[in-house]
Amino acid sequence: MTRNYIDLNCDVGEGVGNEKELLPMISSCNIACGGHAGNKESMTKVVSLAKANSVLVGAHPSYPDISNFGRLSIEIGAKELIDSIRSQVNSLVEVLDEHGVKLHHIKPHGALYNDIVKDATLAVLFLEAIKEYKNDACLYAPYGSEIAKEALKEGFRIKYEGFADRNYEVDLSLVSRKLPKALITDKKEVLKHILEMAKNKKVKTIDGKEMPIFVDTFCIHGDTPPALEIVLYLTQELPNHNMYIKK
């Protein structure tokens, strides 16, 4: 029987400190690069771990808003936002160059991610900020989003991202973290969520509807409290469904 592989990514370098345990079990990571968390020291540490564990590395830029962990939409001028995103990605690339590691992808964080999903104008600004890496790195973005549509128009390579530890609304947006069922923390429910998306190309929304979705890479947030427990469970249980995490 042919094996089926999935890419499992985690947001890391955000101050949780669980990267040493997480990275051996995942296939790609998104490293905070100063906008909401992260600095030269943390980026260097995570890049070294990623290289040692053959984990693909992506930049994880956000609104420049450390105080709110990049999870609130902020008022910011177009040039200031573009300059900030460029600076964040470039700061990680400098560390990657020092370690002989290539930038594999770019994935926005938090409120910026959610905003460019729905706002085409903001999505175009984000693409302008990262255009230097258009031919070298792919973009992690949700299926059906404005950022994905605009990126494809501009010739960016896309990896559609699905969230294994988050619930979805019927429009395929994520349930707000302000609401009680935003996070999925039960490891068995996370597995079911992944299998539904990977095998059936559908996602069960918060109100019980099944919506079509396409996913190339699944995210487990590194700061989800049981992240380590969930990822370990997935490495053990996915093979029972003929699915394996790429390594």
Image (tube, grey):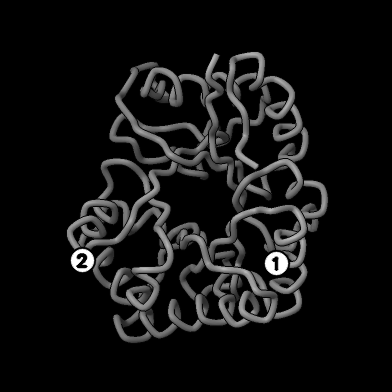
Q: Residue at x 55, y 42 (%)?
A: 219
227 left or right of 80 in image: right
Q: Residues within 10 Å of mark 2 (few under 14, many from 20)?
A: few
Residue 245 drawn above or below residue 39 = above
Q: Report x, y in % for residue 134.
A: 34, 69
Q: Residue furthest front?
A: 1
Q: Which tag, 2 or 1, sits closer to the chain's start?
A: 1
Q: Position of residue 142 (x, y in %)?
A: 36, 45
Q: Nearer the viewer, residue 69 or 142?
A: 142
- Is 71 positioned to the left or the right of 247 in the image? left
The numbered dot on residue 20 is none
Q: Quadrant of the N terminus?
A: top right
SS under mark 1: helix
Q: Which mark is residue 121?
A: 2
Q: Which picture quadrant has residue 211? A: top left
- Which secondary structure, mark 2? helix
Query: What kind of residue is marked 2?
Result: Thr
In front here: 72 or 139? 139
Identify whether 100 is placed above or below 7: below
Q: Position of residue 20 (x, y in %)?
A: 82, 54
Q: Residue at x 27, y 67 (%)?
A: 122
Q: Report x, y in % for residue 18.
A: 79, 52
Q: CA distance from mark 2 to mark 1?
A: 32 Å
Q: Which residue is mark 1?
A: 47
